[in-house]
Amino acid sequence: MEGGPLLTDWWKKSTKRFVPYLNISARLPEKPDQQMMTQFGLRGFPTFLILDSEGQILFGKEPYWRPDSPENLEAGLAEVETIFRLKKRVSENPEDKLSKAHLTLILGLLNPDQCSVAEMEAACKVEGVPAEVVGRWLRERSRIRFLEAFGPYRNAFSTGAEKEELARLRKAAMERAFTMVRDGESIGEDDPDFRAFWVLAFDGAMEAKDRRVATRCLKTYTDVFGVADRFVKGMKERLEELPVQVE
């Protein structure tokens, strides 16, 4: 990190609370951690993550996190220490519904492409769960609902899965995006998966022969990315071939 935070007193003091690991992302043959970018679904570096002893991401992937100040580092550590406290409570008392629900929401928000929307919804309804965590879920629900279907497809694509498996997962992502748009739900324009969402929603609408939804998808996509975007021409041509629906 620029400015040398790794050598500062505040950083050295903070590392008493965790074990730092530095991965130099050089592409070298037989490098043991060469696949870390793919393994954790990362898109670039530097990327800073906090992992548990089993290698599960606890903090840092989404949103982008840079622990280059005491405040930023503390924000990540505080979140993680809350997780450890909740895990301990659940381990000691499996019937603790409040701690279990709180933990479900936090882990789901930290790893949206691995969470269950149904479990998150149920956790929200448990009395006593902090309102701030529930509010975060309500704001992120649409995005997480999409990632529940899109995440497996993206991961399979990045790891070079078989064509049949890719096709199956892509179809599931298409259906999820299409259903969301049809039901009046979408993700924010500032979301990194915004483009993928509308392309998949359009493809899902075409698969379902739903011209109304396909038209909306194309309009939204074109409004944001412009008529010169590489996908727009093909989308328009496909839409023109779709029969007009009679109300």
Image: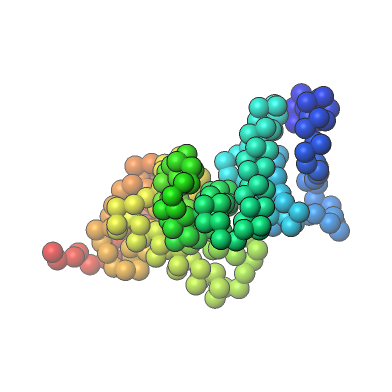
Q: Residue 181: x percent and y percent?
A: 33, 55
Q: Residue 18: x percent and y percent?
A: 78, 41
Q: In this view, does 106 lie to the left or right of 23?
A: left
Image quadrant in which the C terminus is located? bottom left
Q: Is residue 157 left or right of residue 12?
A: left
Location of residue 158 by image quarter: bottom right
Residue projecting furthest to the bottom: 164
| Of 232 and 43, the residue lying toward us | 43
Q: Residue 174: x percent and y percent?
A: 42, 63
Q: Which residue is drawn at 81% across and 36% down?
A: 16
Q: Residue at x 62, y 69 (%)?
A: 161
Looking at the image, how many numbered discs can be counted on the residues?
0
Question: Does the rendering let one see residue 31?
Answer: yes
Question: Does the rendering let one see residue 197?
Answer: no
Q: Which residue is drawn at 66% across and 57% down?
A: 92
Q: In this view, does 9 lie above or below 45?
A: above
